[in-house]
Image (spheres, rainbow, N blue to C red):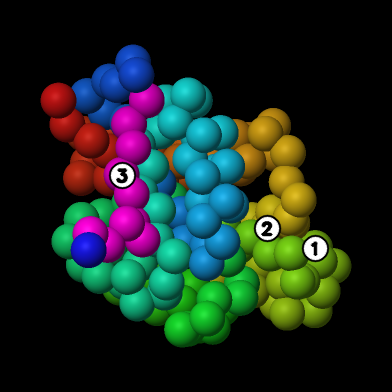
Amino acid sequence: MKDTSSNISHPPSATSHQPRILVVDDEPDVCWALENILCPAGYAVTTATRGVEALELLARQPYAVAFVDAKLPDLDGLELVALIRQRSPHTAVVLISGYYYREDPIVMEGLAKNLYIGFVSKPFSLNEVRSMASRAANRTGEENDVESPYSTRG
């Protein structure tokens, strides 16, 4: 049986320097929604439904941005964020959650410590996700050359 827990998608008009985004959420529908919001906007998206799987993907290739759910079944999302920042410091992380809210002390503390650059609550809007992805990718682009390993190559 083929493992379909991770997925890699590229938009139809793929360019040679698409920022790579890792989406980590245990809900396949959320992964699908984020993938279908981000791919048409020009991002190369990989999805993972488990924290351990996300770490394995990060070990294989760098990502410009990671959207990480705060609650995962195998690893606490906030712990995963800390591990991503430790192992891939140039990856801009965006926390997503249907459990926490923007003003939650845990969310505010993570923002203050620069563990993640933004927070998106579920349910999210197309514009909110694309705006956050653009902000995160631009931040990564400022820290890294456009030709960096954080984007795809033709």
Mark 1 falls on what kind of element? loop
Q: Looking at the picture, which amino acid does disc 1 mark?
A: Arg
Mark 2 falls on what kind of element? strand
Position above or below: 65 against 49: above
Give the quadrant of the N terminus: bottom left
Indicate which disc, 2 or 3, sits on the residue closer to the N terminus: 3
Report the magenta residues as a range: 2-11
Image quadrant assignment for residue 4: bottom left
The answer to whether the residues at label 1 and label 2 have Cβ atoms under 8 Å apart is yes
Q: Please tell me how crowded label 2 is: few (under 14), some (14-19), or many (20+) other residues with Cα within 10 Å.
A: many
Q: Residue at x 38, y 42 (%)?
A: 45
Outermost right residue? 103
The answer to whether the residues at label 1 and label 3 have Cβ atoms under 8 Å apart is no
Q: Is 10 part of what is drawn in magenta?
A: yes
Q: Is 83 part of what is drawn in magenta?
A: no
Q: Residue at x 20, y 45 (%)?
A: 149
Q: Which residue is mark 1?
A: 102
Give the quadrant of the C terminus: top left
Q: Residue at x 42, y 72 (%)?
A: 50
Any mark on residue 119, and which? Answer: 2
Q: Which residue is mark 3?
A: 8
- Residue 36 spot, x, y in % from top left: 52, 34
Q: Residue at x 31, y 44 (%)?
A: 8
- Residue 104 spot, x, y in % from top left: 82, 74
Q: Please tell me how crowded label 3 is: few (under 14), some (14-19), or many (20+) other residues with Cα within 10 Å.
A: few
